[in-house]
């Protein structure tokens, strides 16, 4: 039921930068062929071990994933897709 051309997703407990949607919009405006955009995240609270793991190992894990899959993965905590692509893959 989204009315716009871009669907952005995040989690209810995320702390987003004030310009989060502007960054996403600018990325889609810059590359008209792009169908998905996303990025990593940080933990601001929770166990110290989890915050350290996310900060120092997440990017490495995504690099490994990219090496095997040939593409970047998207994280629903910080991603956006065109509505047409979202519908094309069945949501």
Image (tube, rainbow, N blue to C red):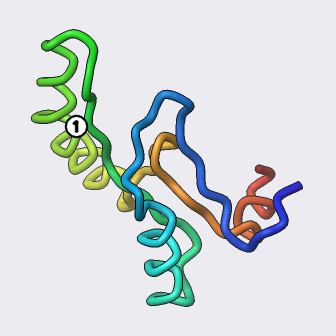
Label 1 Cα crowd, 10 Å radius (few <14 / some 14-19 / many 20+): some
Comparing 60 with 68, the one in front is 60
In the picture provided, is 71 more to the left or to the right than 48?
Answer: right
Comparing 77 with 36, the one in front is 77
In percent of width and height, residue 43 lies at 27, 29
Image quadrant where one finds the N terminus:
bottom right
Q: In the structure shown, which secondary structural element does the residue marked by tag 1 occupy?
A: helix
Comparing 12 with 75, the one in front is 12
Q: Place residue 8 in its image quadrant.
A: bottom right
In the picture provided, is 72 more to the left or to the right than 78?
Answer: left
Which residue is at a point 22% across and 50% down the rendered structure image?
A: 63
Which residue is at a point 80% across and 60% down the rendered structure image?
A: 87
Which residue is at a point 55% across and 89% down the rendered structure image?
A: 32
Q: Place residue 67 in its image quadrant.
A: bottom left
- Return the residue at label 1: 58
Comparing 13 with 76, the one in front is 13
Q: Say if 76 sits above or below 22 in the image.
A: above
Q: Place residue 23 in its image quadrant.
A: bottom left
In percent of width and height, residue 72 lies at 37, 57
Circle count? 1
Q: Say if 73 sits above or below 26 in the image.
A: above
Q: Say if 49 sits above or below 86 in the image.
A: above
Outermost residue on the top side: it is 47
In the picture provided, is 36 more to the left or to the right than 68?
Answer: right
Which residue is at a point 67% across and 68% down the rendered structure image?
A: 6
In the picture provided, is 55 more to the left or to the right than 16?
Answer: left
In percent of width and height, residue 37 lies at 47, 65
Q: Say if 41 sits above or below 88 in the image.
A: above
Outermost residue on the front side: it is 18
Outermost residue on the right side: it is 1
């Amino acid at each position: 039921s989204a009315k716009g051309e871009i669907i952005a997703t995040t989690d209810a407990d995320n702390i987003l930068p004030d310009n989060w949607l502007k960054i996403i919009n600018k990325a889609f405006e810059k590359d008209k062929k792009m169908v998905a955009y996303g990025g990593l995240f940080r933990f601001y609270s929770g166990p110290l071990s989890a915050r350290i793991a996310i900060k120092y190992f997440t990017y490495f894990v995504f690099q490994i994933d990219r090496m095997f899959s040939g593409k970047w993965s998207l994280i629903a905590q910080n991603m956006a897709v065109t509505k047409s692509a979202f519908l094309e893959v069945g949501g």
